[in-house]
Image (tube, helix red, strand yellow):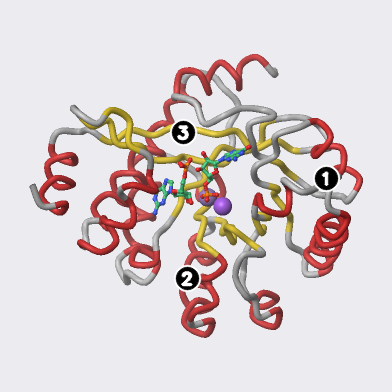
């Protein structure tokens, strides 16, 4: 079967699902956010990870439909956690290049928030650094329209692309997500320590928060705390988990 047909069928058969990875405020140790990560429960192949279908979805044009599914389901889940009495946390979703440039996206996001009774501040959209820097003037316009809606923006995979700092400064974004390539070398490659320390200092000067990705050890967390990094995400605290398991994590800390 052609990939496009397969992905359409997967949507129709409701084979996509979301896993959730907590985002921890380093200073307090509290969960302050959660990133939704899509998976495909394939009837034959089992659980398929995004690396094996998101690029195909991008090429075939199905990414908009899948992206909207992710947005609706993540927001519905966030509202469900809240209704069950859990504390409100920010929910972050990944936005692909095609979605980001889709003129309809702002209206769809506004509608989904309204449908679920979520405050815009509770939603964060993650766009990659390379996506944001491809046409910075255009990105700036799009990001400003999101800012007007009241949602936040994260620059994902930060440090893997080439940022124009002048644009980064004028983008209305809440945070940068420091790519895990830097985090994994903390404590072993002194250049990574220097880079992370400098990125955090620069980000704070620009009024941006820093979220470290791929934190796997207590030692990495200690280094990040020392450099003033704001939040972390990674296997050290939790792998991406299903919605029920995330609910338990959230409950346990309060
Ligand atoms: O855990 P993981 O294998 O889920 O994520 C791998 C990559 O897939 C990450 O770069 C992540 O940004 C991307 N990804 C995960 N979920 C989504 C999604 O819902 N939409 C898009 N566009 N990308 C996603
Ligand atoms: O959107 P993004 O590229 O940031 O997606 C996060 C990716 O990183 C997902 O594939 C997720 O499963 C993965 N991930 C999350 N925490 C860790 C970690 O501590 N170590 C590693 N190696 N990967 C992680
Ligand atoms: Mn991400
Ligand atoms: Na990332």
Q: Quick one: label 3 or label 1, which is nearer the N terminus?
A: 3
Left or right of residue 135, residue 66 in this image: left
| Foreground disc of the pair 3, 1 | 1
Q: Is mark 3 within 8 Å of ligand 1?
A: no
Seen in the image, is 143 located left or right of residue 204? left
Q: Residue furthest right?
A: 226
Assign a secondary structure to mark 1: helix
Name the side, left or right, on which 79 lies relative to 108. Answer: right
**Vertical placement of 112 versus 80: above or below?**
below
Say if residue 114 shows up in the picture.
no
Location of residue 170 in the rendering, given as x and y in whole percent from the top left corner: 66, 78
Circle 2 crowding by C-alpha within 10 Å: few under 14, some 14–19, many from 20: some
Mark 3 neighbour class, 10 Å CA radius: few under 14, some 14 to 19, many 20 or more: many
At 39% from the left edge and 66% from the top edge, which residue is drawn?
Answer: 97
Q: Quadrant of ligand 2?
A: top right
Residue under numbered circle 1: 224
Distance from label 3 to label 1 (Cα)?
Answer: 28 Å
Mark 1 or 2 closer to N-term? 2
**Residue marked by disc 3:** 78
Mark 1 Cα shell of 10 Å, populated few (<14), some (14-19), many (≥20)? many
């Amino acid at each position: 079967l052609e990939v496009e047909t397969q992905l359409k069928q997967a949507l129709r058969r409701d084979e996509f699902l979301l896993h959730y990875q907590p985002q921890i405020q380093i200073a307090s140790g509290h969960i302050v956010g959660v990133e939704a990560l899509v998976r495909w429960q394939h009837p034959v192949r089992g659980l398929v990870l995004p690396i094996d279908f998101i690029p195909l979805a991008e090429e075939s044009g199905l990414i908009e439909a899948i992206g909207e599914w992710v947005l609706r389901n993540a927001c519905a889940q966030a509202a469900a956690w809240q209704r069950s009495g859990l504390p409100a946390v920010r929910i972050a979703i990944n936005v692909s290049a095609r979605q980001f440039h889709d003129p309809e996206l702002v209206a769809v996001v506004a509608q989904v928030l309204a449908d679920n009774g979520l405050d815009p501040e509770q939603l964060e959209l993650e766009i990659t650094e390379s996506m944001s820097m491809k046409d910075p003037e255009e990105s700036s316009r799009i990001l400003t329209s999101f800012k007007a809606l009241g949602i936040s923006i994260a620059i994902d995979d930060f440090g893997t692309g080439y940022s124009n700092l002048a644009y980064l400064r004028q983008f209305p974004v809440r945070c940068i997500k420091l790519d895990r390539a830097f985090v994994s070398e903390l404590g072993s490659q002194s250049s990574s320590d220097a880079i992370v320390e400098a990125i955090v200092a620069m980000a704070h000067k620009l009024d941006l928060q820093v979220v470290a990705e791929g934190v796997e050890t207590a030692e990495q967390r200690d280094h990040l705390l020392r450099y003033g990094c704001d939040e972390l995400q990674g296997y050290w605290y939790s792998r991406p988990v299903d919605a029920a398991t995330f609910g338990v994590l959230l409950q346990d800390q309060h």
